[in-house]
Amino acid sequence: MSLAVRLSPVTDPTPQPPAILARLIESFRQQSVAYCCWKNPSRLPDSFAGRSDLDLLIARTARATALQIFASCGFKHAPDAAWHDDPSVLSFLGFDESSGALLHVHAHFRLVVGPPLFKNDRIPCETGFLSRAPMLDNQMRVLSCEDRALLLIIRAQCELSWADPVVWRHRRRNEQKFRDEFAGLAADIRPEVFLSAATHLFGPELAQDVLALAHRENAPFAPFGLRTRIRRALAPYRKCGGFEAMVAQGFRAIGLLFGVFNRNVLQTPRTWRRRAPGGGVVIAFVGVDGSGKSTAAAGVRQWLGGEIDVVQHYFGTGEGAPSLVLAPFKLLARAISPFIKTKPKGASHGRISDRPPGPLYATLFAVWALAVALDKRHKLKSVQRAIRRGFVVVTDRYPQNEDPKFNDGPLLPRLPVVPEWLRRFEASVYEQARRTPPDLVVKLLVGPETVMRREPDMNVTIIKERLACIDTLRFQGARLVAVDAKTSLAEVTLAVRQAVWSII
């Protein structure tokens, strides 16, 4: 039986890895860095497309060289959140320039396993696994069939802990995944090779029992007695003892539950997955109404959010999420708007007259401007807290005081008479935004026809003024990138991702 069949029951050849990953693998080969993919090789197509993480076991002795190779090939280190960080595992992100996919590589310098929240067990077989790892489809080194089977048996005893809420939720699915993967290997296991690897780890007596387990119907799950012996054999290599591990797992479970509650309810910037490489950054999308800012911002959050902690803020007054300060005023504005048939000079939507605002409109507008300024001040503070904690902050719009005629500029200059204290307060909020500019500003450029089609209620004159104004905005200290939003969504998405990747 050929080694290729023994490695993978799947007959379809593995697709070519993206260029950035191919450079990484070739650099490992050229500099004699021992490595292999230590999880199911049938997942490699998903890893190459960015749909799944790629787990590489790398020789501990080659760690310094491997880190240099990751950097030289364009990968960026994304530190894990402190609550689930492991010193023997590093996370790297790479960007496929052709497809826009985000690649996530876990570099394991020690082989640690365990339930999702607390990987407590180490398997001291790294050197042997790497020495026996063959090349799959002339693309990447993977574990041999026997080493994969041995590792699956060990993981089946260590990873399905009842103390882990993630395991509770997905236990049946994970058990079936273990069974399916092992079933694809069982017929190709060479007993003498498997026994040799197991003996090196467990000793001859336990190795014989583990080999017998590999041919049982319920493999890779061991009966209670054998499971206990396997775990006892690995006990000297654990990070924590039994009681300490139980306490640590309990604290992490509580942290997980709080994190879910925070993400869905409180929405405060608390690290969850991993931090941005080099620290937090602010990425702002600006453009006239209808240019696709909300779509682009949501797309970046979805693209990065599976790998890095991302928070999104909406600095406008339209359909985005307001703060608690602005929310009641938005409801009030919706109730009043139908009764305002004509809006004064300075408005952007609806019927606009050449007359200045009347006393009633000016009073209501001043109250609205105060609420908007309070909303922006609150969000600006939240943005600064988030970037200090390592978040990528994506904003739909960003306050500016370079041109009051452009959206997200001060509102009170439209009124002829305003209390001086109110004018100073609003100006201080926009000045704060000027002093804390985004790291990256993506200008989405469209033509007037596109805006009129997407925003039929917007005044044509205002559209043309704002289109001319957007080129003049500089956001002092920010990197500016202009994207032609008149092209297809796929082209816009790729251009936006390229700009974002360059800044994180």
Image (tube, helix red, strand yellow):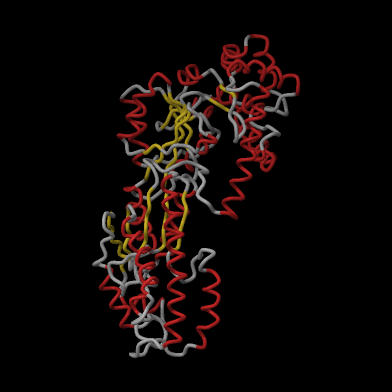
User: Residue 343 at x, y = what percent?
Assistant: 41, 86
Using the image as rendered, state which of residue 208 and residue 265 is in the foreground: 265
Using the image as rendered, state which of residue 400 and residue 69 is in the foreground: 400
Q: Residue at x 37, y 23 (%)?
A: 33
User: Residue 489 at x, y = what percent?
Assistant: 39, 63
Q: Residue at x 40, y 40 (%)?
A: 93
User: Residue 323 at x, y = what percent?
Assistant: 51, 63
Q: Residue furthest left?
A: 472
Q: How many marks?
A: 0
Q: Is residue 286 left or right of residue 181?
A: left
User: Residue 164 at x, y = what percent?
Assistant: 66, 36
Using the image as rendered, state which of residue 180 and residue 34 is in the foreground: 34
Q: Residue furthest right?
A: 224
127 versus 343 height, above or below: above
Using the image as rendered, state which of residue 236 and residue 28 is in the foreground: 236
Quarter of the image where one finds residue 437: bottom left
88 versus 493 height, above or below: above
310 versus 222 height, above or below: below
Q: Residue at x 67, y 13 (%)?
A: 206
Q: Residue at x 35, y 87 (%)?
A: 356
Q: Is residue 497 left or right of residue 194?
A: left
Quarter of the image where one finds residue 92: top left
